[in-house]
Amino acid sequence: MRKSKNVQELFTLPVNLEPVLYTDGIMVYSSEGLRNKFKEVISGLESTKDIAPYIAKLIENGIIIPCYMNKGILKFLSYKIFSRKEEQGIMGFYHLGQKKVFILIENNITFWGHGNDKIMTLTLLHECMHLLADTKPKTFWTMFSSELNSYYQEFLKEYFQLKSLPKTDKLVKLLTVFEGEGRSKITSRFAQYKTIISETREDTTLKEDEYQERLDTYFKVLDMGMNDTSTLINKIYNRDKTVLRIIVSLYKSYHAAFKVTNTVTTPFQEMFAPSEVLCVLSELKPSYSKIRKIFKILA
């Protein structure tokens, strides 16, 4: 039995691989040996031993795919040396079209094939939350409605300086539809979204012009987050005060709602993708019982 919580596991290096997905100009590769090694690692870790049988089944069914972006040792080493840091920072992703979770092994291991179990476990939890939200939306939203309401109550109270926690049932319901419809249909719901948010006006401690300025800014940043992410990131980097006010409120809401500090993301997707709240929560509180249950549901 492994007692260490940060076991360094030796992974199969990128040989004897076969292509499994081509997306956005990138080919990813996997192999039976890599998939078997991943199952072996997961079953031996303290952090995943309780859910290992479900993860193994998802791997066997081709839903979770451990993979490489580079086929062969030379390409792997070249990638580790010369690729951009932001590329190496992508640990995994959920592919909406394929309905599969891809764990990028080369971004989770060293030159010598050693991987950190904590990073891989958190990546797996995060991406499987996206998987559940997309493939079993009713189950997902019913299961986590209380957590979502807690988060958005704290956010609205903080950002609009409310006297008390607002009711957020209508907002959470709209956001779940909002996310599920896709960005092409979201714009038509902006007016409805704004109407629901504006109900907080009666409880604010802000002056009318201050409240209106925050409301208008919120929807400008929301639109930017969905349609012009690079500009939003530049504004965050340059410490734009009106944008940072929203980001800070989103940050604070994690601690207020869940008693944890968000150390894993720069929050902004929460404005239009409520599943992101729960994906972040899965990384901050990976032992949370509801999060562990999702693997049984998915398998």
Image (tube, rainbow, N blue to C red):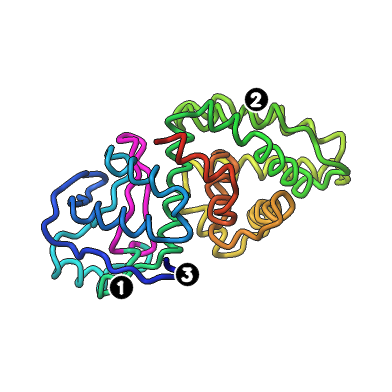
Based on the picture, tell me whether residue 96 belongs to the magenta stretch: yes
Residue 98 vs residue 224, the one in the foreground: 98
For the residues labelled 1 and 2, the Cα–Cα distance comes to: 49 Å
Seen in the image, is 190 located left or right of residue 146? left
Question: 160 above or below 90?
Answer: above
Seen in the image, is 79 located left or right of residue 146? left
The dot on residue 12 is none
* Residue 50 screen position, x and y as percent: 47, 50
- The residue segment tinted magenta is 87-106
Residue assigned mark 2: 192
* Quarter of the rendering containing residue 208: top right
For the residues labelled 2 and 3, the Cα–Cα distance comes to: 52 Å
Based on the picture, tell me whether residue 174 belongs to the magenta stretch: no
Residue assigned mark 1: 110
Residue at left offset 58%, top offset 50%? 281
Residue at left offset 60%, top offset 42%? 271
Question: Counting other residues with Cα less than 10 Å from the Cα at mark 1, is it few (<14), some (14-19), or many (20 or more)?
Answer: some
Residue 161 vs residue 220, the one in the foreground: 161
Seen in the image, is 48 located left or right of residue 174? left
Residue at left offset 75%, top offset 46%? 154
Residue assigned mark 3: 3
Q: Secondary structure at mark 3?
A: loop
Sequence-wise, which precedes: disc 2 or disc 3?
3
Residue 287 vs residue 267, the one in the foreground: 287
